[in-house]
């Protein structure tokens, strides 16, 4: 049985050497105890501008099990994972971050569970060490909101670190959508899944590649590609708006009848109505636009990524 390790890398030259050493150490143990018979490590260089590609090139020269797919520019981690899924040749694959926040030493345990017949092994973060309070807080809110809004069972607090069986890989290869929230798509296939817990260590070296804005965009992708509930919320808001406008109209008419001299048809109520409805309209338009934008992107059917170079593949 062959395992493929897929690692998206964006400017990770400070961690590559340590990562390869630790990965090889663990995978050699796996070979020794006959947990696996073969392995490959596929690095996806997501348009790095530092020495990542240079380093990967030299490592892949010495060992043909180390493979590299290099993008012509930065396409983002989710697309890099997709390229890894397309290139992987194993009976199962493990997706992990390059920065050693996903410890390679957990791989044997994941393979053991996979041998029991689970098709996806999620790795749930019990604790996150060395990450800002704001990141932890927003991540926590996001996973819970996603869970409330979607019908697919995306496990709470698990990132992209997971093992996928060949069946899931084949399923994922069929998906052509552009806004890819891999953690959701993997679950869509509907096979048996297991969640293991681990304490997530701090980044080994280098800077985080996810700015707040980038994380926010991923969160929006996650919610809009797995739920149309936000669209339905607009309808609910519309209904609330209509009900309140009736109350306002009744109030205005009653005042005119009961106190014709004291109450002029006021500009206040007019203002409330105008502001209220224009805000609802704007909000609805924005939200609908969000989905239409996505339809537009999908309809164009552009290739997901452009490969500059392939090594040992
Ligand atoms: N990454 C990538 N492309 C990007 C951003 C990130 O391939 O545009 C990779 C990065 O090299 C790392 C993983 O995705 O291997 C997770 O990134 P990071 O550690 O910055 O995210 P965090 O741990 O903060 O969620
Ligand atoms: Mg990280």
Image (cartoon, rainbow, N blue to C red):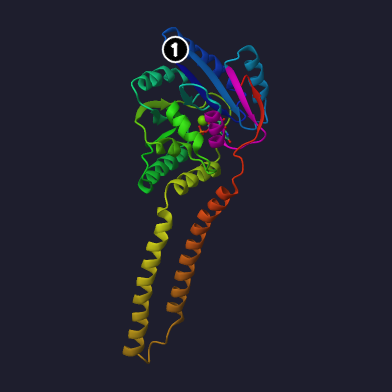
Q: Name the residue beneath numbered marker 1.
A: 30
Residue bounds of the magenta highlight: 66-86
Q: Is residue 19 above or below residue 47?
A: above
Can you tell me which quadrant of the image ligand 1 is in? top right
Q: Quadrant of the N terminus?
A: top left
> In the image, is residue 51 above or below residue 218?
above
Q: Residue furthest top?
A: 32
- Residue at 48%, 10% in the rendered image: 28
Q: Is residue 297 left or right of residue 152?
A: right
Q: Mark 1: which secondary structure? A: helix
Task: Residue 246 in the image: state x and y as whole percent.
Answer: 35, 76
Q: Quadrant of residue 79?
A: top right
Q: As rendered, which of 69 and 209 lies closer to the eye?
A: 69
At 39% from the left and 30% from the top, the residue drawn is 124
Instruction: Answer above or below: position of 239 versus 252.
Output: above
Q: Residue furthest bottom?
A: 261
Q: Is residue 42 left or right of residue 263?
A: right
Task: Give the residue at x 40% y 63%.
Answer: 235
Can the viewer see residue 99? no
Image point (59%, 45%), residue name: 301
Q: Which one is nearer the viewer's eye here, 257 or 155?
A: 155
Q: Is residue 78 magenta?
A: yes
Q: Residue 10, position in %: x, y? A: 60, 31
Say which of 245 and 42 sits in front.
42
* Mark 1 neighbour class, 10 Å CA radius: few under 14, some 14 to 19, many 20 or more: some
Where is residue 205 shown, x and y percent of the image? 56, 25
**Quarter of the image containing the C terminus?**
top right
Q: Is residue 178 magenta?
A: no
Could you tell me residue 33's position as x and y percent? 41, 8
């Amino acid at each position: 049985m062959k395992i493929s390790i897929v690692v998206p890398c964006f400017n990770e030259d400070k961690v590559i050497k340590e990562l390869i050493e630790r990965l090889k150490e663990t995978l050699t143990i796996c070979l020794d105890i006959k947990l696996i018979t073969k392995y490959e490590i596929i690095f996806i260089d997501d348009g790095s501008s530092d020495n990542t590609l240079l380093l990967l090139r030299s490592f892949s020269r010495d060992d043909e099990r180390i493979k590299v797919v290099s993008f012509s520019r930065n396409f983002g981690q989710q697309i890099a994972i997709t390229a890894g899924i397309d290139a992987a040749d194993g009976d199962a694959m493990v997706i992990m971050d390059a920065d050693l926040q996903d410890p390679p030493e957990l791989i044997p345990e994941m393979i053991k569970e996979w041998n029991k017949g689970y098709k996806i092994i999620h790795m749930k973060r019990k604790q996150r060490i060395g990450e800002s309070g704001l990141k932890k807080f927003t991540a926590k809110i996001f996973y819970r909101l996603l869970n409330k809004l979607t019908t697919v069972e995306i496990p709470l607090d698990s990132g992209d670190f997971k093992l996928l069986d060949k069946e899931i890989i084949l399923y994922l290869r069929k998906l052509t959508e552009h806004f890819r929230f891999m953690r959701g798509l993997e679950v869509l296939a509907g096979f048996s899944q297991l969640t293991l817990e681990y304490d997530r260590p701090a980044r080994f070296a280098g800077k985080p590649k996810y700015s707040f804005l980038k994380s926010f965009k991923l969160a929006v992708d996650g919610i809009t590609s797995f739920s149309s509930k936000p669209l339905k919320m607009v309808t609910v808001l519309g209904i609330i708006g209509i009900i309140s406008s009736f109350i306002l109209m009744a109030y205005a008419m009653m005042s005119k009848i009961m106190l014709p001299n004291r109450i002029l048809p006021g500009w206040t109520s007019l203002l409330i109505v105008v502001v209220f409805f224009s805000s609802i309209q704007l909000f609805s338009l924005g939200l609908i636009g969000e989905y239409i934008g996505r339809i537009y992107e999908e309809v164009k059917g552009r290739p997901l990524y452009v490969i500059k170079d392939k090594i040992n593949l």
